[in-house]
Amino acid sequence: MRVEKPAEAASSRQTFLFLQGPSSPLFARIADNLQRLGHRCLRVNLCAGDWVFWRRPGALNYRGHPDGWPAFVAALLDRERVTGIVLLGEERPHHLVAIAAAKERGIPVYAVEMGYLRPDWIRIEKGGSGHHSHFPVEPTAILRAAADLPEPDLRAHYSQTFVSDAVYDLMFNLPNVFAWFFFPHYRWHAIFHPLAEYYGWIGRLLTGRRRTRESEETIARVTDGSDPYFVMPLQLETDYQIRSYSVFRSQRTAIKLVITSFAENANPNARLLIKVHPLDNGLIKWPDEIKAHAQRHGVADRVHFIDGGNLNRMVARSAGVVTINSTAGMVGLQRGIPVKTLGLAIYDIPGMTDDQPLDSFWLEPKAPDAELVGAFVRLVAATVHVRGNFYSDAGVEAGAAAIAKRLHENTVNEPGGFVEEPQRSRPDKDHF
C-alpha cells in the first residue's frame, strides 16, 4: 500500500498577502473564506482596477514608483509577519519582486490561474507555474503518485458567459484608464491598451456570424476528406505564458516557424489548420499574416485559418497538434493525439508530448502513452485544481471556498504533486 506524505499541520492563524488577481471577485471571496477560518488577509492595490475588486478591509494602496516597490513589499512582509502570498501571474514585474522577497524569508507563494483542465477548473500551485512549477515531471513519479487517485469528473459544473467576462473586464480596466491619476506610476502588463482591445472586440462582434460560417465550411472541407491534417491552436497574443515560458515574444514568430517547417517537411497532401483563440481581440490581422507567409512558402492551398468552430472536434480527427504551451495541448493528449510543444508546458512530459524535432513531427508524430496521460490528469486534478471559474457567481463561490480550504489545510499540491526543487527550465530553441 502506498504511504502518502501527510500534509503539514495548518497554522491556527496565518496572514495571507493578496497581490493582483483576476478581474473578478475571486480573491476577495477567498479572503472572506479564510477570515471565517480564522486567518488574516491583506491586499496591496497597484491600480484602480485592483481597488474595485477588493472592497473589504485589509487593503493598502501602493501609488509609488516601481523603483520603490522592492523596499515597500519587503518591509510589508516583515512588519505584518506575512505567512503566504496569493497572486495571479507570477511573471508580472511587481510579482517577480515580491516573490524574490518571499523566497528570502521562506514565505510560500501560491499562484492562481485558469485551469490546465477545462472548462470550469481553477488551478492553485505552490511556487508557481512554468519553470517555477514544483509539479513532478518524471513519468515514474507521476504514475506512482496517481496510482490510488480517483478519476476526476470532467463534466462542466459551472457556466460563465462572454457577457460576464466582458463586464468584469470593463470594471477592471475602465477605472485604470479614467482614474489613472490615483495610481500615476502603474503600467499595464498587457500589450494592448484596454480601449484598443474594446475597439477590436466591437469589430469581432459585428462580424461574428460571417466568421463562424466561413470557419465551419473550412473545417468541414478539411476534416471530412482523406488527407491528414494538423491543428495549431493560437493563444492570446497577450498571454504571459508565451513571453515567460517560451523563446517567443510574439506568436508571429511561432507561426512563421511552424508554417516554414510544415512547408519544407510535411507530406504534400497534409494540411494545417491554424485556429484563432476564441477571445482574440482582432487587432492583429492573423488571416492576412498567415496567408502571406503560406504563400511565400507555396502552401497557401494547404494552410487554413480558422476563426471559430469546435476545437475538440477538430483535434479528435487530426494527425497531431502543434502549440507553444496552450492548454489546448491537453485536448489532444486526452484524446490520444500526438502533441508537439514549442514552449514550456506542465504537460510536456516524456512519454506524453512528442520530443522529436518539429521537422520530424509532421512525418511520424508519436502518440502519447495513454496510461501516463490518465495518471497525469488524475494527479493534476487532485493536487493543483479546484472546481470553479472566474466569471460566474456560482463558479467564483465554489472556487473561493475550495482554494481557502486548501490554504487553510496546507494541502496545495498534495497528495504527491510537489517536488522540493522545480524540475523544469526555461526552453531554448533546441526545444523544437
Image (cartoon, rainbow, N blue to C red):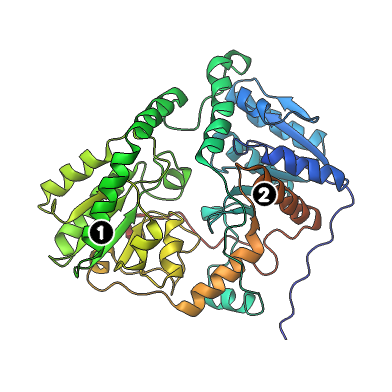
- Image position, residue 42 (x, y; %): 77, 35
Question: Could you classify mark 2 by the number of other residues whose Cα lies within 10 Å: few (under 14), some (14-19), or many (20 or more)?
Answer: many
Q: Secondary structure at mark 2?
A: strand
- N-terminal of the pair, mark 2 or mark 1, is 2
Q: Quadrant of the C terminus?
A: bottom left
* Residue at the extreme top: 181
Q: Work out whether residue 294 or residue 414 is closer to the camera in this orientation and state it.
A: 294
The residue located at (19%, 68%) in the rendering is: 227
Quarter of the view holding residue 16 = top right
- Image position, residue 387 (x, y; %): 65, 56
* Residue at the extreme left: 298
Three-letter residue code for mark 2: Tyr
Task: Give left or right: position of 267 versus 86.
Answer: left
Task: Give left or right: position of 156 versus 238.
Answer: right
Quarter of the view holding residue 134 = bottom right
Does the image show residue 212?
yes
CA separation, marks 2 and 1?
A: 43 Å
Q: Which residue is mark 2?
A: 110
Q: Work out whether residue 294 or residue 92 is closer to the camera in this orientation and state it.
A: 294
On residue 102, which mark appears?
none
- Image position, residue 7 (x, y; %): 78, 65
Q: Quadrant of the N terminus?
A: bottom right
Does the image show residue 418?
no
The residue located at (61%, 79%) in the rendering is: 144
- Image position, residue 429 (x, y; %): 33, 55
Task: Give left or right: position of 215 versus 376.
Answer: left
Q: Work out whether residue 151 or residue 116 is closer to the camera in this orientation and state it.
A: 151
The residue located at (67%, 26%) in the rendering is: 51
Residue 119, above or below 32: below
Question: Could you classify mark 1 by the number of other residues whose Cα lies within 10 Å: few (under 14), some (14-19), or many (20 or more)?
Answer: few
Q: Which residue is mark 1?
A: 220
